[in-house]
Image: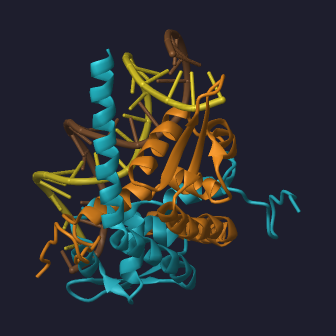
Chain colours: A cyan, B orange, C yellow, D brown
Amino acid sequence: MAEQRPQGGTACYDAYLASCPTRKLLDEIAGKWVSLIVVALGDGPLRYSDLSRQVAGVSQKMLTQTLRVLERDGLVTRTVTPSVPARVDYELTTLGTGLGGLLDGFKAWAEHNFEAVDSARGRYDARSADLTIEANAAG
Amino acid sequence: MAEQRPQGGTACYDAYLASCPTRKLLDEIAGKWVSLIVVALGDGPLRYSDLSRQVAGVSQKMLTQTLRVLERDGLVTRTVTPSVPARVDYELTTLGTGLGGLLDGFKAWAEHNFEAVDSARGRYDARSADLTIEANAAG
DNA sequence: CAGGATCCACCAGGATACTG
DNA sequence: CAGTATCCTGGTGGATCCTG
């Protein structure tokens, strides 16, 4: 089953392999901006300005840059309405919707499990402090 | 609105807000190394060396650094067996397993949809080239 | 084997200014 | 409104050397 297929068909892509192109794709679609933007578009099409308001704190550079990548990857469509002033809508493609479902759970996980993570950090830091004290006492 | 809840209960965490701590958590757990490492641990405990082999191409710095973060966040446990040479096993916690399920689908998505993304890129680049030619002809 | 410590290159990404 | 262009800096992350 592990047959490499450079052309067409279903290849044996494996992101564990450093040389596999899917590794770069994984690197590209992982990241908070992609997550936040794709999830925001999950509820339906949004204009550029709406998107920048929804994903608070994103710079226009990162917003535009991320949207271009997503558009190039076929995850979102960019629709320009040549009115005055111009209007641009971004919408998830079928492909993008699939990823959106995953990222949606991802964002939700972070929000839902933050307190558990935060308390784990507290325990970890307390234990580290204890070890430091012990080391000092022993040293 | 957006009342922050420092203590207990279910807060109104929202990663869309730049100031929300979940935004930083999202930023932390997004990223290829976290994804690859957590997914690798999804099949069961692994030693440090096994992990570095499984996640091909990861530097020991990034591997260690990422594992420390995951341990601090309560996503993995680090078990040291003081033999000679020393042996260290990493294992997902319950919390980590939950995230692992999501990231698993994430990695799988990248592998499964790479060809669709790749062909979309081809179309995008071809279209961009056309537009450049048109612009040059018109200019 | 499982790291810690260091140096350094690169670039992600914010701030700012300008445009159709 | 929806970008583009440029400058600049902090941090990511690889390479390398060292240790228990």
Quarter placement of the N terminus of chain B: bottom left
Q: State the residue at coordinates (14%, 78%).
A: B2
Q: Nearer the viewer, residue A82 or A76?
A: A76
Task: Residue B49: give x, y in percent of width and height.
Answer: 66, 36
Please determine whether, in this image, residue B69 is positioned above or below residue C3.
below
Q: Quadrant of the image for the C terminus of chain B?
A: bottom left
In the shown orientation, is residue B121 left or right of residue A47? right
- C3 vs A5, nearest the viewer: C3
Based on the displayed image, in which of its 4 quarters is residue B40 positioned?
bottom right
Q: Tell me what residue is drawn at x 69 percent, y 48 percent.
A: A17
In the rendered image, residue A132, in percent from the top left (x then y), is placed at 30, 29
Question: Residue sitting at 27 percent across and 20 percent down?
Answer: A137
Q: For this view, does B26 lie left or right of residue B88? A: left
Q: Where is residue B62 in the image (x, y as percent from the top left)?
A: 49, 39
Return the residue nearer the eye: B105 or A4.
B105
* Residue A43 locus on image (x, y percent): 38, 88
Q: Can residue A63 be seen in this view?
A: no
Q: In this view, does A1 lie above or below D12?
A: below
Taking depth in this image into account, of B59 and D14 the one nearest to the observer is B59
Snapshot quadrant of residue A118: bottom left
Q: Residue at x 26, y 78 (%)?
A: B10
Question: How many numbered discs, if any?
Answer: 0
Q: Is residue B74 visible?
A: yes
Q: Is B63 on the left or on the right of A135, as rendered?
A: right
